[in-house]
Image (cartoon, helix red, strand yellow):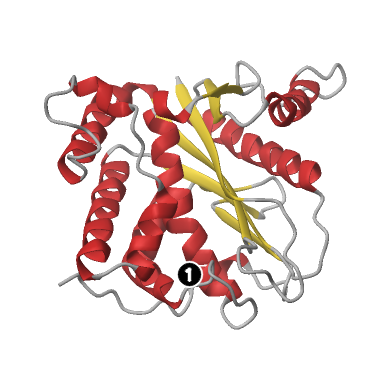
Amino acid sequence: MHIAYIDDAGDLGNVANPPNRNDQPVFALTLLLVNQTRLAALVPEFITLKRNYFPGLCPPASHFLDSVRPEIKGADLRRDIARGNRNQSRHAIRFLDEVLNLCIRSDVKLISKVFVKEPGRQNQHTAVYTSSCQSLFRAFDHSLTSAEDFGICIADARTKGLNVPVAHSIFTQMFSLRHPQYPRIVEVPTFGHSDNHVGVQVCDLLTSGLIVPMVTHTYCTGHITNIHVQPGYVLIRERFTQRVQQLLYRYQDAQGSWRGGITVSDAILQRPSSLMFQNVPSASSPS
């Protein structure tokens, strides 16, 4: 059995023209693929990382497994890297280093849909989220077919009003009488609280802590100016791009086109998804 964990970063709100200080220029929806047999090792290793790097968040006297509940947010880590002092930046980088290495050892894979917003352009919130989820499910089902396995999906809960339309869109495709889809996925996505699921927490760290700042630096620099577009994000690109690429699940469809991986829809200049992996600055180690 494979488990897919889904989390998002950013929002689907509009970016004003000119952008307001807190308009988020990027929205990302990521699906993390984990073989269920890996969880027995991945979960305690991740909790150990949390306790080692954030001892104040997870008091040593507390029960070991209780440490799953307090969360470390990827948005806080990218802020520390881009705008924190030297010690904060180094601490966040090293923690994300450990998380990425754990994912690679655990053969975790990811697929992500990322949207770069154009200032002044209206976004279709429900349609974007629903179509993105369907795209991720197609890639998930393909991975299950390749592995000759079956899977389920746990998505980070939002609200019932937001969760139900997404699950229903998958339901109507899964149980279509004419063209049923996702034969390897055993149920529609269920929604869980991130403080109960290590997979969702890791998905947040990768999405908010790495993918969003990498895409923001690549596609928004020079086009959007506000607090969410930080020159310090270059540190994340140079340090983590190569290892993020190792996690990507990519495949060719029946027409020979590449699918999966990180797909960027750039509403500003329609630049290709491959741009974020090109001309990456040389990595530098934290001193």
What is the x, y in percent for residue 227?
53, 69
In the picture, measured across the screen, residue 278 lies left or right of residue 127, that is left
What is the x, y in percent for residue 97?
26, 54
| 130, above or below 285, in the image | above
Residue at the left extreme of this rendering: 61
Residue for point 33% across, 65% down = 81
On-image quarter of the N terminus: top left
Q: Residues within 10 Å of mark 1 (few under 14, many from 20)?
A: some
On-image quarter of the C terminus: bottom left
The image quadrant that residue 116 belongs to is: bottom right
Residue for point 82% across, 50% down = 124
In the picture, measured across the screen, residue 72 lies left or right of residue 145, that is left
Three-letter code, disc 1: Phe
What is the x, y in percent for residue 22?
61, 63
Residue at the bottom extreme of this rendering: 222
Which residue is the site of mark 1? 277
Query: Depth check: 84 or 278 in front?
Result: 84
